[in-house]
Image (cartoon, rainbow, N blue to C red):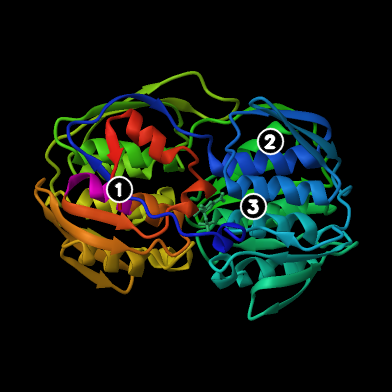
Amino acid sequence: MSEQSEGAARPLSLRAEGPLSGNVKVPGDKSISHRSLMLGALAVGRTTVSGLLEGEDVRATAAALQAMGALVAQKDDIWTVDGVGVGGLLEPESVLDLGNSGTSARLFMGLLASHPLTATFIGDGSLQKRPMGRVVEPLTRIGARFVSREGRLPLTMTGTEQPLPIDYTLPVASAQVKSAVLLAGLNTPGDMIVREPTVTRDHSERMLEAFGAKLSIRQTGEGKQICLHGQANLLPMNIIVPGDISSAAFPLVAALIVPGSEIEVTGVGLNPTRTGLIDALRLLGAKIDIREGKPAGSEPVGDIGVRAGPLVGTSIPAVLAPLMIDEYPILMVAAAFAEGETEMRGLEELRVKESDRLAVMAEGLAACGVPVRLLSDGIVITGSGGAPVVGGATVASHLDHRIAMSFAILGLNAARPIIVDDARPVDTSFPGFVELLCTLGASQQES
Ligand code: S3P
């Protein structure tokens, strides 16, 4: 968002005059896209990637890799990465601007921790507020050194020539921290061990194995244990990136809350560490059909169909949180139309995302006439039972793409328009969001 913040805000208000219908595809998975480019850059030879998310976050990763010597190019919808080999990244001559992307920042810190070079990371106002201490701590134990303001960006790091393998138990359920340590392990002689008491998305493990890294994974009484044996030789790959379930979540919930709708989103990644939203929506009573298709490499893929129907308030188990952490804002929108109360807990991590999503959602829902009770680790939402919410508010997106899209979707079934003050952050993860909703029958309202 750094460039965007220089231009004018782009308000957004959507409405639906009738049911939504159709069959759509969403852009590629953001997590898998970042990892495709990063691992491609560390392989020796040319990796090709199709279906890459061409959002700003992934472009920030591509630009940073270019600045460190990998060649990243695009021809039509195929991206190529000419990798430099593990240990071959060069010191960037300029600061690395990672925009809004926490994944880029944390994964790059891991990647560079075991390279003897110095890099400075900067980001937009949102990224500057996000805690980096969670990666700085284990990477310091590996031997990297960091200078920052209270563990936040701007941050300068110097990786080490003699990295030490560590045995690290994740203190917070974070795939980014897990991935940072594993990526540092690629150029570290010996066994880098990460213990994960709570399951988090496992794209890094799947892709590292596919690129030829030596990985052993065990389930223990205390959770999952991942051991990466370095130094690795990575082989280039042809990668197909599936649609992002975190983006599919928006049209799916849109169809659930606009009466009479029926839609299908095809080619969506269905990795079981990402599908908590489907379970949560089914707990609310949503009618969802899933058709499994051909996997994309090591990632399961399928089509998801939904029909609008009555939703009933319930308690969303906290164990689902790491399996759908990015989908809570849009789940809260679904809950706003359920009959009765929906309670969601175990959501402390939402406070350190692109915005404090717990506080921002509570405030925005309340402004739109949805009764909410904010808890320290969650929220209780009293739904309308399917009737339009009051609306008639302008909601701030706080440089947060998922907040912007969630309130745009809420506006589809509101008595009075809901205006998102600035929808530019949407481009970080879901270019074409508005056009896709319009394809399904929504329209953009002049604001
Ligand atoms: C991501 C992990 C999650 C998620 C983020 C992408 C990843 O963050 O919220 O959007 O690609 O590893 P945490 O690791 O902080 O939970």
Q: Quadrant of residue 62?
A: top right
Task: Give the Cα separation between the discs numbered 3 and 1.
Answer: 43 Å
Q: Above or below — where is 327 with respect to 1? A: above
- In the rendered image, the residue lying farthest to the top is 294
Q: Report the magenta stretch's main SS.
A: helix
Amino acid at the residue labelled 2 = Glu
- The structure residue drawn at horizontal position 64% and vertical position 56%, both measured from the top left corner, is 194
Which residues make up the magenta segment? 407-414
Q: Is residue 79 left or right of residue 332?
A: right
Residue carrying label 1: 446
Amino acid at the residue labelled 1 = Glu
Q: Considering the image in quadrants, where does the N terminus appear?
A: bottom right
Which of the two residues, 340 or 276, is positioned nearer the viewer here?
A: 340
Q: Residues within 10 Å of mark 3 (few under 14, many from 20)?
A: many
Question: Residue 146: where, in percent of width, then height?
Answer: 76, 73
Task: Give the Cα separation between the discs numbered 3 and 2.
Answer: 13 Å
Viewer can see residue 305: yes
Question: Residue 104: where, in percent of width, then height?
Answer: 65, 54
Indicate whether residue 241 is drawn in magenta.
no
Q: Secondary structure at mark 1?
A: loop
Indicate whether residue 413 is drawn in magenta.
yes
Q: Secondary structure at mark 2?
A: helix
Residue carrying label 3: 179
Residue carrying label 2: 209
